Amino acid sequence: MHKTLLLVLLAASCFGQNAAKLPVSYPRVVAKVALTGRTAPIPTTTLFTPAKDGLYRISSYGVVTVDISTFGQWDVLLNWVDDSGPELCGGSNGAQPCALMYMWTDSPLHYGAGIGGYSYAAPNTTTVVQAKAGVPVTYSVVADANGSPTGSTYELFITVEQLMQF
C-alpha cells in the first residue's frame, strides 16, 4: 500500500511539473457574454481587460426577438485602445465607439453587422482588435438616434478569443 501511494505521489509530482511548463495554446477564450430578454440599453461595460498587449477576435451574435411595428435600432458598440490610441468611429449617434452590430426592430432580417458598414447577410460579426494591456475593452448597447427600439426585445452573445500575445 505504501508503494502504491508513493508511486501515485511521484506521478502526480512529475505530471504537475510538466503541466506547468506547457506553452499557452492559442486561440483561447478570455471572455463571454450571453444576454437574453433584454429590453433596455446596456451602459458601457467591461468585456475584458488584457493582462498583456495582444491580438483578440471578438465574435458576436445579436437579434431582435420581439418586434415593434416601427423602425428602431439597437447599436452594439465596442471600444478598445491599441497602439494608436482609443479606437473611435462615427455612427448615427455621432462620434462614438465602433459599432460592432446593429439590430433592427421592423425588419424581417432584424440585424446588421460589421464595423465601418452594414451587412445584411448574417446576424453576427467577427472583429479582430489589437488591445493594450491594462486598458479595458468595453461594449454597450444603445438606442440608435435614427429610430427608437422601445418595446422591442433582443438577445446578445459575445465571445472573445486571444489570438496572440505580444
Image (cartoon, helix red, strand yellow):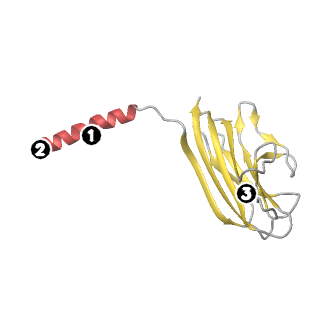
The residue at 73%/57% (across/down) is 43
The quadrant holding residue 11 is top left
The quadrant holding residue 40 is bottom right
74, above or below 117, in the image: below
* Horizontal side of residue 85 vs 61, given as left or right: right
67, above or below 142, in the image: below
Q: Which residue is labeled 2 in the image? A: 2
Three-letter amino acid code at the position of disc 2 = His
The residue at 39%/31% (across/down) is 21
Three-letter amino acid code at the position of disc 1 = Ala
Under circle 3, the secondary element is: strand
Q: Which residue is labeled 1 in the image? A: 12
Q: Which residue is labeled 3 in the image? A: 43
Q: Percent from the top left, x then y, of residue 47?
A: 64, 49
Q: Pick whichever of labels 1 and 3 is earlier in the sequence.
A: 1
In depth, the one of 137 and 108 nearer the eye is 108
In depth, the one of 85 and 73 nearer the eye is 73
How far apart are labels 2 and 1 at the CA level? 15 Å
